[in-house]
Image (tube, grey):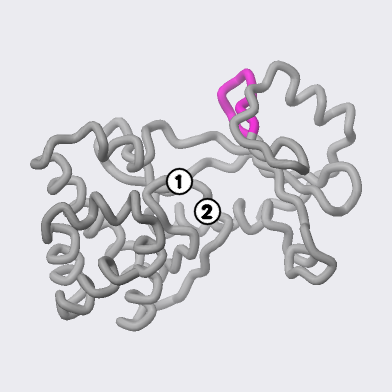
Amino acid sequence: MIGLQRLSPEEFEGMRDGAEVIEKDHDGDKVLRLKDGTFIKVFRVKGLVSSAWFLPYSLRFARNAEELSKRGVQTVSIKQCFRLTGWKETAVHYKPLPGKNLRQVFPALKAEGVSKLAAQLAGFYAHLQQKGIYFRSLHLGNILQLPDGTLGLIDIADMRFSRNALGEEQRLRNLKHLARYSQDVEYLTKDDTFCATYAAKTGIEPGRVEQVIKGG
């Protein structure tokens, strides 16, 4: 099991020398692409009362990657977790998955391709839930299409795992996460492919699936 390694400011600056900043906010850099192609994602505890004081998000990210791999789901490969200066900042160093996220893939597809990918996504999502995986941060931006055409997950800090498959209500509640993003729903409702495929894979009544996706 991966633990937190202390990283001094000098060591951190050495690692990030020449890195590309992929994401940042008012508190500083959040995601960095290092010169060797690996990534560092920084997590900061925002509040005085937070479970992240006891289990930092960097460790959750790393442990989720390990658990996803055990369950046969493709995701990033963890190299190390770090505690940075002070106690509010930790980071995870990982090797990314190759590929493009589905928000990049869908717009480039014609109608037939959209339907094919929607069916694949519905099957993939149903498979995750059958494996007992509840992905709270689900959206098309953190599902990748890999070079071989299969799908994998990134940005995996916010999920939980069950020993058994998710129940129907859990599945639908989790499906609502997709419906929060209009740019995602646009591609999932081009025709009835996504809803029909997901319903067939899960045994859930198609009307309930469509209501969740279209109704948000």
Corner quadrant of residue 29: top right
Q: Secondary structure at mark 1?
A: loop
Dot 1 corresponds to which residue? 75
Query: Given contact means CB atoms under 8 Å apart, are the residues at marks 2 and 1 in contact?
Result: yes
What numbered label is drawn on residue 153?
none
x, y percentage for residue 184? 33, 52
| Residue nearest the viewer, comparing 142 with 97 | 142
What numbered label is drawn on residue 156?
2
Q: Secondary structure at mark 2?
A: loop
In the drawing, does residue 84 fall left or right of residue 62? right
Identify the residue at horizontal 53%, vertical 41% (top origin): 77
Whether residue 80 is visible, yes or no, is no
x, y percentage for residue 210? 20, 71
Question: Is residue 28 depicted above or below 63 in this figure?
Answer: above
The mark nearer the N terminus, 2 or 1, is 1
Q: Give the extent of the magenta segment.
A: 32-39
Question: Is residue 169 depicted above or below 132 in this figure?
Answer: below
Q: What kind of residue is marked 1?
A: Thr
In the drawing, does residue 57 fall left or right of residue 141? right
Specify the principal SS of the magenta part. loop
Identify the residue at horizontal 23%, vertical 55% (top origin): 188
- Label 2 – label 1 distance at C-alpha: 8 Å
